[in-house]
Image (cartoon, rainbow, N blue to C red):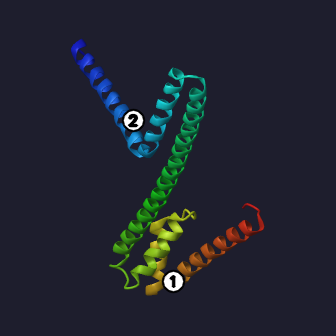
């Protein structure tokens, strides 16, 4: 690889890192904007305290320190609020993904049965809410149960087994033991 190409690639990476860093700082300032005036006022008071005479200087140091404390408290509160919003956003996003997946299972099941909502909701719960059941296997068994047929007894036994397994797991969690 020619030296110029390597230098161009490295320069592009540096530009990207600088851009990301600057956008992160601007984002933080934009989020913490309400604490900035308090911090600036604290700095001004502390600088003035260095210039003025003793009694006034002492009062300005006290006021500047108090404003600095208020600004720091505000930043901490804003950060807590931001973290809570991010966590809530993540929970909401996961719920949306789960619902989208459930609807996709409905699309798969609707060709096989009119009870596709029941099938899709059950498949989604069994396959993705901690049970780790194969979704294709669950879909096949549930459709067989709803439609009937020669394998219905096998599918009913499979579903009863899953219900028993879930019940044992729930009982173990309630008593504080692990399976």
Q: Nearer the viewer, residue 21 or 123?
A: 21
Above/below status of 76 relative to 92: above
At x 42% / y 40%, what residue is drawn?
28
Residue 63, given in percent of the width and then of the height, sits at 56, 36
Residue, disc 2: 25
**What residue sits 31% from the left and 30% below the top?**
16
Specify the quadrant of the image occupied by residue 166.
Answer: bottom right
From the viewer's perspective, is 32 left or right of 167? left
Residue 140 visible in the picture: no
Q: Which quadrant, please, contains the N terminus?
A: top left
Give me the residue at 48% from left, 78% from top: 142
Residue occupying image coordinates x 45% and y 73%:
139
Q: Residues within 10 Å of mark 2 (few under 14, many from 20)?
A: few
Above or below, 63 relative to 89: above
The residue mark sitting in front, 2 or 1, is: 2
SS assignment at label 1? helix
- As drawn, the label of residue 129 is none
Residue 27 picture quarter:
top left
Question: Residue 32, how many percent across, how many down?
Answer: 44, 44
Where is residue 118? Give x, y as percent. 45, 81
Q: Which residue is mark 1?
A: 152
Quarter of the image with the C terminus is: bottom right
Vertical arrangement, residue 98 with respect to residue 39, above or below:
below
Residue count near mark 1 (Cα–Cα under 10 Å), binned few <14, some 14–19, many ≥20: some
Instruction: Give the spatial CA distance, label 2 vs label 1.
Output: 62 Å
Instruction: Classify 179 as above or below 152.
Output: above
Q: Position of residue 143 (x, y in %)?
A: 44, 80
């Amino acid at each position: 690889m020619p030296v110029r190409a390597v230098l161009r690639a490295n320069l592009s990476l540096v530009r990207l890192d600088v851009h990301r860093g600057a956008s992160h700082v601007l984002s933080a300032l934009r989020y913490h904007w309400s604490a900035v005036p308090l911090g600036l006022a604290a700095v001004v008071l502390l600088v003035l305290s260095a210039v003025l005479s003793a009694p006034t200087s002492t009062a300005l140091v006290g006021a500047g320190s108090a404003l600095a404390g208020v600004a720091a408290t505000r930043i901490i509160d804003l950060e807590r609020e931001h973290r809570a919003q991010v966590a809530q956003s993540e929970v909401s996003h996961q719920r949306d993904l789960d619902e989208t997946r459930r609807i996709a299972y409905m699309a798969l099941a609707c060709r096989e049965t009119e009870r596709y909502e029941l099938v899709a909701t059950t498949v989604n719960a069994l396959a993705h809410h901690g049970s780790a059941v194969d979704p294709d296997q669950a879909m096949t068994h549930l459709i067989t149960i709803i439609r009937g047929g020669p394998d219905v007894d096998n599918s009913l036994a499979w579903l009863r087994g899953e219900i028993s397994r879930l019940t044992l797991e729930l009982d173990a969690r309630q008593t504080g033991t692990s399976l």
